[in-house]
Amino acid sequence: MHKTHQHKITIGLVLTTVPRYSETFFRNKIKGLQNNGFNVMLFVDYVEEGDLNFPCTIVKSSNFNSNNPLRSIFNSCTSILKSLLLHPKRSFKLYQLDKKDGLSFKKRIRNVIVNEFLLTKQLDWLHFGFGMLTNNRENVAEAINAKMAVSFRGFDLYLSPLKHKNCYDRLFLKEVKYHVLSQEMKQDVINFNVSANKIEVIPPAINIDFFKPQTIRKSNEVVNIVTVARLHWKKGIEYTLQAIHQLKQKGINFHYTVIGDGGQFERLTFAIYQLGLQDNVTLAGKLPQETVRKHLEQSDIYIQYSEQEGFCNAVLEAQAMGLMCIVSNAEGLSENVLNEKTGWVIPKRNPKLLADKIVEVINLSSSKKQNIKETAINRVREEFNLQKQNASFVRFYKD
């Protein structure tokens, strides 16, 4: 009797770079899929030293933006030759599909050249890790006879269309399965005339064995407040500093630590100086995960007063650690934190409201604080664990 071999589903995940150590979402997703019998390949534009040790096949794009014009021309010529000689049917199909979409001859040829590395493998799914990575690649999945999937996160769904007008017009006309982080994001994609049954909500997940509350928490006279975020305007840190300034005016003994780096460091440093908060605020920079956890262990209140936020893993981690979480009502945060049950959700861009809420939380009874903490810890452990997320992605690709 002959044994039948079940087909092993192969997923091509398109990213800009190999996921870094801190990009736990992609690393956990890849590991989870592999553990569930899927084959995963990474298609990236850039590879750095050490990336080749990543535990899956990596396919790198040629460098078409080299500072050396001759190198760019050589890579373009090599790419078109590979397209014609190694996969002519796929290249021609991509060319024809782009033509059908009304792209110019120049853009059609360019797309065949720059997407040549995506035409090389036999895939069941071609999954773009961010929405903007689909630009000029809307027809690649069909050209290689693969199903197409796209993940939207907060930045590329809400901000990219403002910077790049009509950037998703062609994408939303294609046969695509979408992954989003929250029900609100799903509704926003539906508003682009995308069918609801093509959109799957799979929220982030965290390592609940790593982020878990201390059995005994030290009580401090100083209220320790923390935020873990990139120093980017969308994180609302300047509004948080204005609220923190009001705490100081009220005579509250506190210290606020911001963990993360980014382009707003000088702006925030100057704001701290102008508000007279040099002794009350620390910009700690980017820290290892172990050190982040230690900061959370020593903190009382977590703030994520973002102007825009798809969901935010850091808020899940803070809840799992037993911190009192105060967040804005930006997009997915109101699904991340349940107002008055696992924390507090307040309107964004209102420093006075934030300051008042922090004071209110500080003055809560011990029993009320404990109830909020326990509800948050239990919900994160039950709803946002890696096992549940892995099972959701298995269904995503098998349905």
Image (tube, rainbow, N blue to C red):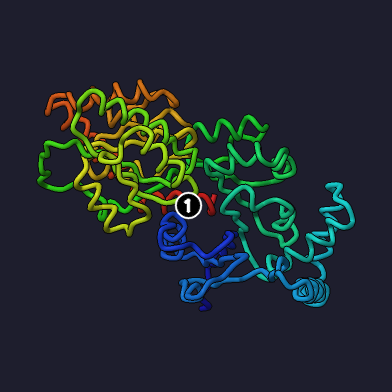
Query: Horizontal placement of 358 versus 392: left or right?
Result: left
In x, y percent, where is residue 240?
37, 32
Please report the residue visible at 71 percent of the width from the left and 65 percent of the height from the top. Answer: 65
Q: Is residue 322 above or below residue 85?
A: above
Residue 334 showing in the rendered view: no
In x, y percent, where is residue 15?
58, 59
Query: Horizontal placement of 177 versus 378: left or right?
Result: right
Dot 1 amino acid type? Phe
User: Which residue occupies the extreme right position in the image?
Assistant: 105
Please report the residue visible at 44 percent of the width from the left and 54 percent of the height from the top. Answer: 25
Q: Is residue 183 above or below residue 46?
A: above
Tell which of 223 and 59 is nearer to you: 223
In x, y percent, where is residue 63?
69, 70
Q: Is residue 4 above or below residue 99?
A: below
- Tell me the crowding category of disc 1: few under 14, some 14 to 19, or many 20 or more residues within 10 angstroms, Cα based: some
**Circle 1 sits in a helix, a strand or a loop, which is it?**
helix
Tell which of 148 and 331 is nearer to you: 331
Residue 142 sits in which quadrant?
bottom right
Query: Horizontal placement of 188 versus 279: left or right?
Result: right
Residue 319 sits in which quadrant?
top left
Q: How many marks?
A: 1
Please report the residue visible at 56 percent of the width from the left and 66 percent of the height from the top. Answer: 42
User: Pointer 1: what residue?
Assistant: 393
Residue 321 showing in the rendered view: yes
In x, y percent, where is residue 157?
59, 40
Query: Horizontal placement of 335 versus 300: left or right?
Result: right
Residue 275 sits in which quadrant?
top left
Please report the residue visible at 50 percent of the width from the left and 64 percent of the height from the top. Answer: 38
